Amino acid sequence: MKLYLVRHGEYENRRGDNILSENGRLATEKAAKIVKDHYKVECNSIFHSTKTRAKETAEIINKIFKTQNGIFEKKGLEPNSNPTPWKKIINEMNESVMIVGHLPFLRKLLSLLIASDVDTDILTFYTSCIVCLEKTSDGSWIIDWCIH
């Protein structure tokens, strides 16, 4: 099983909502195309937070990867959400999924999955960053690759 963690693209505030900037759209599309050209992506569903910038990022990526089940908005993926419930949800999944979210949530979730500690910094999540994790036979997680 693969798990893809994606930080939303660069954004701007327009009419009180944080939406992707043109640069954020282009960078997200470029990162997704690089991934598609260089890696075999197995992704059944994309989950994104309730924030517009995450939804827009998920939509751009889904156009390129064409997931089997589509895109789903999920609560608990917002910037300051607790990653612990998601560790349990992810570990019970049998299908590869992508989570599009924010900092510090993604950083903490990655740390929890890799090091079992939300405070261990594993890597820097730049905007439009895509990280692929793979579940090993013993149930632990390793980083397979990262694009930013």
Image: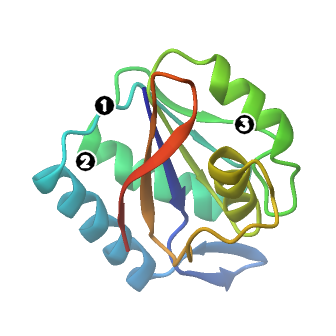
User: If the image is split into quadrants, where does the C terminus sit?
Assistant: bottom left
User: In what quadrant of the picture does the N terminus appear?
Assistant: top left
Percent position of residue 23, x then y: 39, 84
The spot of residue 90 in percent (x, y) is 64, 29
Disc on the earlier residue, 2 or 1? 1
- Residue at mark 2 to residue at mark 1: CA–CA distance: 13 Å
Marks 2, 1: nearer the viewer: 1
Q: What residue does disc 1 label?
A: 42
Image: 124 above or below 45 = below
Q: Are marks 2 and 3 in contact (CB under 8 Å)?
A: no
Q: What element carries label 1?
A: loop
Counting residues from the start of the chain, the first of labels 2 and 3 encountered is 2
Viewer-nearest residue: 136 or 83: 136
Left or right of 72? Residue 16 is right
What residue is at 72 percent from the left and 36 percent from the top?
74
Q: Which residue is drawn at 56% across and 77% down?
A: 124
Quick one: label 3, few (<14), some, or many (20+) residues within 10 Å? some
Above/below status of 42 relative to 10: above
- Residue position for label 3: 74
The amino acid at mark 3 is Lys
Q: What's the residue type where badge 1 is placed?
A: Glu
Q: Earlier in the sequence, mark 1 or mark 3?
A: 1
Q: Label 2 amino acid?
A: Ile
The residue at 65%/25% (across/down) is 91
Q: Mark 2 points at which residue?
A: 64
Q: In this view, does 147 lie to the left or right of 89?
A: left
